[in-house]
Image (cartoon, grey):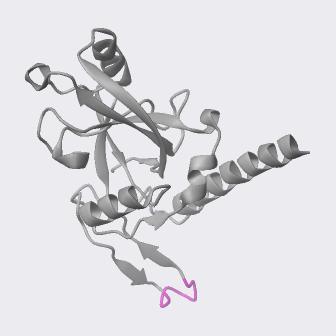
């Protein structure tokens, strides 16, 4: 009986995450991004109740950058399972990210792997280092909006370089250039396209 409950809880978490994404997409948030959005644009709300009786409200969520398979990709962050990450992302983006500790209960298959650098090349990423790297983006096999943080640390910072794919990171780890610490910290960070 306990296994059934755990299975149902995992399915429930996946359904909730997918519902949030569908809601964002159907409201036009992910599709209506302005290509001039900065990474730190504050939250805006527009009430369009004068548009013929349709009472629709839009918000703007700051777009964050990262690498996937060697290419620059864009993401939004709405929820995180650890308060320290909630605070960090909220402070960086000026958008109130929700604390959602139950995200850490999602099954491994419902997550994609994300890599955050704790040292090395300075940049606009988390902890003021290079941009994060995700293992997949929308349309790729293995894509999920649920991003499990793996902390990447260069063993010798003089060897640090910009890595733009999960394969590059795994290769550097195999060569002993860096170490990866799995965290079980999950961020709901769906990929978005900028038009």
Quadrant of residue 141 within the rendered picture: top right
Instruction: Residue lying at the far top in this picture: please name it.
Output: 175
Instruction: Residue lying at the far right in this picture: please name it.
Output: 1
The reply, left or right, for residue 35 in relation to residue 103 is left
Q: How many marks?
A: 0
**Residue at image coords 61%, 34%:** 108
Quadrant of residue 167 within the rendered picture: top left
Q: Nearer the viewer, residue 43 or 127?
A: 127
Quadrant of the rendering where the N terminus is positioned: top right
Q: Over which residues does the magenta segment extend? A: 49-55
Q: Nearer the viewer, residue 76 or 88?
A: 88
Secondary structure of the magenta portion, mostly? loop
Quadrant of residue 162 within the rendered picture: top left
Task: Tell me, yes or no, whether the highlighted magenta stretch contains residue 50.
Answer: yes
- Relative to 32, does residue 168 appear above or below in the rendering? above
Residue 154 x/y as whole percent: 21, 26
The reply, left or right, for residue 52 in relation to residue 170 is right
**Residue at image coords 15%, 32%:** 120
Residue 43 x/y as whole percent: 33, 73
Instruction: Residue lying at the far left in this picture: please name it.
Output: 158
**Residue at image coords 17%, 47%:** 128
Q: Taking the image as drawn, is residue 123 in sight?
A: yes
Residue 36 x/y as whole percent: 21, 58
Task: Tell me, yes or no, whether the highlighted magenta stretch contains residue 129.
Answer: no
**Residue at image coords 23%, 57%:** 39
- Relative to 97, does residue 64 appear above or below in the rendering? above
Residue 12 x/y as whole percent: 74, 53
The reply, left or right, for residue 193 in relation to residue 142 is left
């Amino acid at each position: 009986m306990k296994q059934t409950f755990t299975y149902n809880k995992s399915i429930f978490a996946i359904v909730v995450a997918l519902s949030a994404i569908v809601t964002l997409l159907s409201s036009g948030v992910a599709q209506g991004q302005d290509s001039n959005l900065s990474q730190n644009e504050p939250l805006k709300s527009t009430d369009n109740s004068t548009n013929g009786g349709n009472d629709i409200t839009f918000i703007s969520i700051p777009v964050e950058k990262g690498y996937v398979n060697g290419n620059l990709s864009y993401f939004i962050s709405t929820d995180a399972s650890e308060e320290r990450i909630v605070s960090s992302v909220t402070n960086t983006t000026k958008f109130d990210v929700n604390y959602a500790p139950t995200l850490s209960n999602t099954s491994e298959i419902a997550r994609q792997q994300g890599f955050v650098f704790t040292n090395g090349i300075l940049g606009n990423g988390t902890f003021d280092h290079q941009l994060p790297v995700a293992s997949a983006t929308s349309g790729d096999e293995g894509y999920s909006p649920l991003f499990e943080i793996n902390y990447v640390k260069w063993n010798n910072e003089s060897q640090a370089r910009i890595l733009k794919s999960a394969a590059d990171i795994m290769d550097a780890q195999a060569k002993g250039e860096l170490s990866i610490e799995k965290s079980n910290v999950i961020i709901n960070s769906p990929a978005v396209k900028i038009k």
